[in-house]
Amino acid sequence: MISPLTKVIEIDPSPPPDSLGVKGRMQRHADERRELLHSVLESRTFAKSKRLAQFLKFICTLTIDGRLAEINEQQIGIHVFDRSPLYSASDDSIVRTQARLLRQRLEEYFEHEAPSSPLVITIPKGGYIPVFESRSSRFKVPVGEPGASQGLVVSVPATSATKEAKTALRRRPGSVWAFAVAAVLVLALGTSIWIAIRNEPSASDLLWARIFKEGRPVVIVPSDDALVLFEEQTKSPVALDEYLSGSYLDRASSPNPGSLALTSDWFAAHQYTSTADLNLALRLARLPAARNSTIETRYARVLRIDDLKSHNVILIGGMGANPWVGLFINRLNFEVNYDWKNAEGYVLNKHPAQGEASFYRDKVVDGSRHSYGVLAFLPGIEDQGESLLFEGTGMAGTESASDFPFNSSAFTAFAHQIGATSKRLPYFEALLETVSVGGNAPEVHIVTYRRIQP
């Protein structure tokens, strides 16, 4: 661990530019990156993840070769995940889902297996082009700037005490003890500042601490994709009371012309959910705040009201995929739903503020697909415990809501907007828009938000 007083100096060990030449330096950098890539691919972290290793090798090789234009979601799907050249990246989330796992796996490798590697590989969100960067430039964060709470190196400015000590040291050798005392005092001050910064919780930490509270179990409820298939077949939604009683299955025996003839017995016997939902559940369970919590993943169809009263609850999916969201509709301004007849996801804005729309619908504009997600943090049923909802008009929308609280800088900025403090995070709902352009990873931004009164 680097002392708060340590001055970090980066020295380039390479020969002077004239001795290598431009081509020589470019070749040396390429060789360094290939060597690093080889080490990562051969590591224990990636030993059991052949597809993730193939993903990383594909994008890094193209980057090293200077073929950045070939790195996009469509090409990765084709060359890494064996998708057809005609597949739709906006409808198939395999690349986006695996990219999140790849980012996590890289962080694990450089944190645990190669903590002293001078060069690291990252994949910035919003794209798939990897970045090779020095560890020091990646983690140096000045005191007082956004993100400083996660910095590994903190620079403490020289005080008048240190300046006087240095002057005395230059005057006479005997003053070395005075300088040492001053240095110790500054070191103690710097250490206390550094500890305070490291211990300052981020807004995401506050959220996870509320959800994964020791002594109260957490139940994660992923979407019911068999229900989605039923609604697509019947072109009609299923209310929560129908869902719980199973009476909606009576409609399965009379499918619309041209739809799959799946019977009520088939729907009753099959339980499906998406890999994206399961990946989110795993991601949540691996959070440091979740280590001391009892966490259960329960299929929506077997969940009961009493489970929601005795647990903190995390629901994944909009009302069409997870009818339990309907229990919270009266407390939410943004209602995520799906028009099954027109095959269109939308968000109803119940009380639009100035400049807001009443409806936000999935659409394609100039080749870009716009989808919407809602992240809501609110009290549990009958104000018992806490609830966290990840909703979306489609898979891309739900993924945008899922990623938002894991983006510490973006979520912290949002938390300040809604009046969060270092110790308190108010209840809220945030409407997010994700835009997928040209087969690249979606860009996400906050459309609007509401605070929820407890």
Image (cartoon, rainbow, N blue to C red):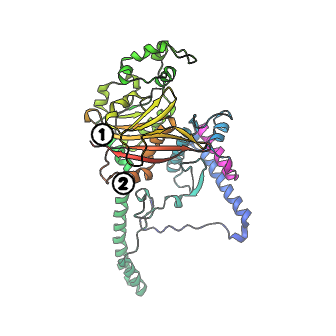
Residue 290 in picture, x, y percent from top left: 37, 40
In the rendered image, the vertical position of residue 287 relative to residue 65, given as above or below = above
Q: Is residue 435 left or right of residue 291?
A: right
Determine if the magenta segment contains residue 65.
Answer: yes
Residue 450, position as x, y percentages in the image: 35, 45
Classify mark 1: residues with Cα within 10 Å, few (<14), some (14-19) or many (20+). some
Residues shaded magenta:
47-69
Q: Residue at x 34, y 38 (%)?
A: 332
How packed is label 2: few (under 14 Cα within 10 Å), some, or many (20 or more)?
A: few
Residue under the image location 48 percent in, 42 percent down: 400
Q: Nearer the viewer, residue 63 or 382?
A: 382
Task: Name which of mark 1 and mark 2 comes first in the sequence.
Answer: 1
Q: Is residue 177 visible?
A: no
Identify which residue, 68 or 378, lies in the foreground: 378
Please name the residue that numbered disc 1 is placed on: 214
Question: Residue 1 appears at what percent x and percent y?
Answer: 44, 59
Q: Amino acid at mark 1?
A: Glu
Q: Amino acid at mark 2?
A: His
Nearer the camera: disc 1 or disc 2: 2
Residue 32 picture quarter: bottom right
The quarter holding residue 188 reads bottom left
- Residue 317 pos. (x, y %): 44, 33
Q: Is residue 363 magenta?
A: no
Look at the image and tell me in which quarter the C terminus lies: top left
Badge 2 is on which residue?
A: 416
Find residue 289 and report its image quarter: top left
Element marked by disc 1: loop
Q: Judge whether residue 364 can be spotted in this image.
A: yes
In the rendered view, does 52 fall on the left or right side of 299? right
Determine whether, in the image, residue 363 is placed left or right of residue 432: right
- The local secondary structure at tag 2 comes to helix
Q: Decide which of 114, 51 is in the foreground and name it.
A: 51
